[in-house]
Amino acid sequence: MVKRVGGIRRKTRSKFRKNIRAQGKISLVHFFQKIDEGSSVVLKAETAYQNGMYCSRFHGKIGKVVGKQGACYKVEIKDGGLKKVQLVHPIHLKKVN
């Protein structure tokens, strides 16, 4: 058998790149933000913190928070015709108005 090549961040060099003004220390306000159930959020990766990061194919997608598990939130995303649930840390989420 052939070994699987690559990990979860394979081919994401340009996709997860941050603006030069956004580089530096991560924001503690975003790290500890509280999000209500039913609110809409955008999946936007904070590349300096890899824990609780979603799969790269969902980058930029809008989802709905359906619950909480530990420090992370359960976000429901439509992928094609299917609804999928991702566990995402709040630092990788941005609220939508």
Image (cartoon, helix red, strand yellow):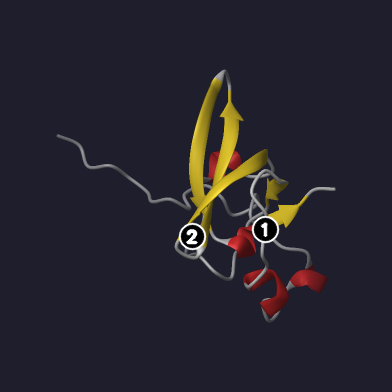
Q: Quadrant of residue 16?
A: bottom right
Q: In this rendering, is residue 56 above or below 32? A: above
CA neighbours of label 2 inside 10 A, class few (<14), some (14 to 19), many (20+):
some
Residue designated by label 1: 35
Residue type at mark 1: give it: Ile
Residue at 55% x, 69% y is 49
Q: In this rendering, is residue 22 above or below 36? A: below
Residue at 43% x, 50% y is 8
| Disc 2 secondary structure class | loop
Residue at 56% x, 50% y is 12
Mark 1 and mark 2 in contact? Answer it, CB < 8 Å. Answer: no
As drawn, the label of residue 52 is: 2
Q: Quadrant of residue 2?
A: top left
Q: In front here: 67 or 60?
A: 67
Whichever of labels 1 and 2 marks the residue nearer the N terminus, that label is 1
Residue type at mark 2: give it: Gly
Q: In this rendering, is residue 31 above or below 55? A: below
Q: Is residue 55 visible?
A: yes
